[in-house]
Amino acid sequence: HARTFTLASYFLPARKRRAAFAFYAFCREADDIVDSGGRSDRPSVVKALRAHRHDLVEALDGRPSGPVFRELRWATREFSIPGSTLFELLDGVARDVDPETYETWDDLENYCEGVASTVGVMCAHVFGVPGGHADLEIASEHARTLGVAMQLTNILRDVGEDACNGRCYLPSDELRRFSSERSAVLECNSLAGPPR
């Protein structure tokens, strides 16, 4: 799924690469669950997300169900990743099951925190921060900020694709500033045109 991720991972030592793959696979599966059902199969998506959450609970309790959760358990223990970060990611991804309307940039930032800042925190733990726990906390806050920036970039890049999937992440107050509204974005077929 991620050519750039794969290339970048080769620069990590084997132990850290293994952990990065584990977190990537966990996040990818959660994202794929939400994207797989589209707009028409909400009950199946909700059920699959619940199962993914249950598998996470089991893995963190020492009963992983399959290779992804086995590796995830190893990585969380090896790099002291708080379980709450993984659950925060699942909560963020679950918000896409029933696409929300974000009124302000602050509302959108809250969504970005869940789906992207959590990944930054995982990376900070895996990559390592010299200097101890206090420095890791500082680095994690910077990683959260970078996660928001990267997710906002994703959102701006994928406006058309998201519209085809019934999603518009652009804040309503920002759209109004430019005499537009969410429905106009969702109904604009030209946004879903070629990537260029």
Image (cartoon, rainbow, N blue to C red):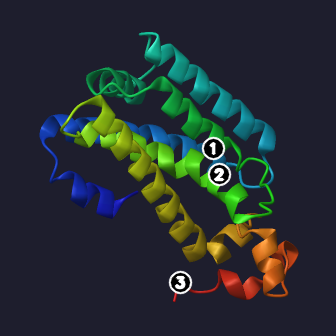
Distance (Cα) linking label 2 and label 1? 6 Å
x and y percent of residue 31 in the render? 56, 47
Residue type beneath disc 2:
Tyr
Say if mark 2 contacts mark 1, CB within 8 Å. yes
Mark closest to the chain's N terminus, 3 or 2: 2
x and y percent of residue 17 in the render? 22, 42
Under circle 3, the secondary element is loop
Residue closest to the eye, 97 or 175:
175
Residue 195 disc label = 3
Residue 100 horizontal side relative to residue 122, left or right = right
The residue indicated by pointer 2 is: 111
Say if mark 3 contacts mark 2, CB within 8 Å. no
Q: Residue at x 37, y 26 (%)?
A: 67
Distance (Cα) linking label 1 and label 3? 26 Å
The relative height of residue 4 versus residue 52 in the rendered view (above or below) is below
Q: Residue at x 74, y 63 (%)?
A: 167
Q: Residue at x 33, y 27 (%)?
A: 71
Q: Residues within 10 Å of mark 2 (few under 14, many from 20)?
A: many
Residue closest to the eye, 103 or 21:
103
Say if mark 1 contacts mark 3, CB within 8 Å. no
The residue indicated by pointer 1 is: 92
Residue 76 horizontal side relative to residue 33, left or right = left
Residue type beneath disc 1:
Gly
Q: Which mark lies nearer to you, 3 or 2? A: 2
Mark closest to the chain's N terminus, 2 or 1: 1
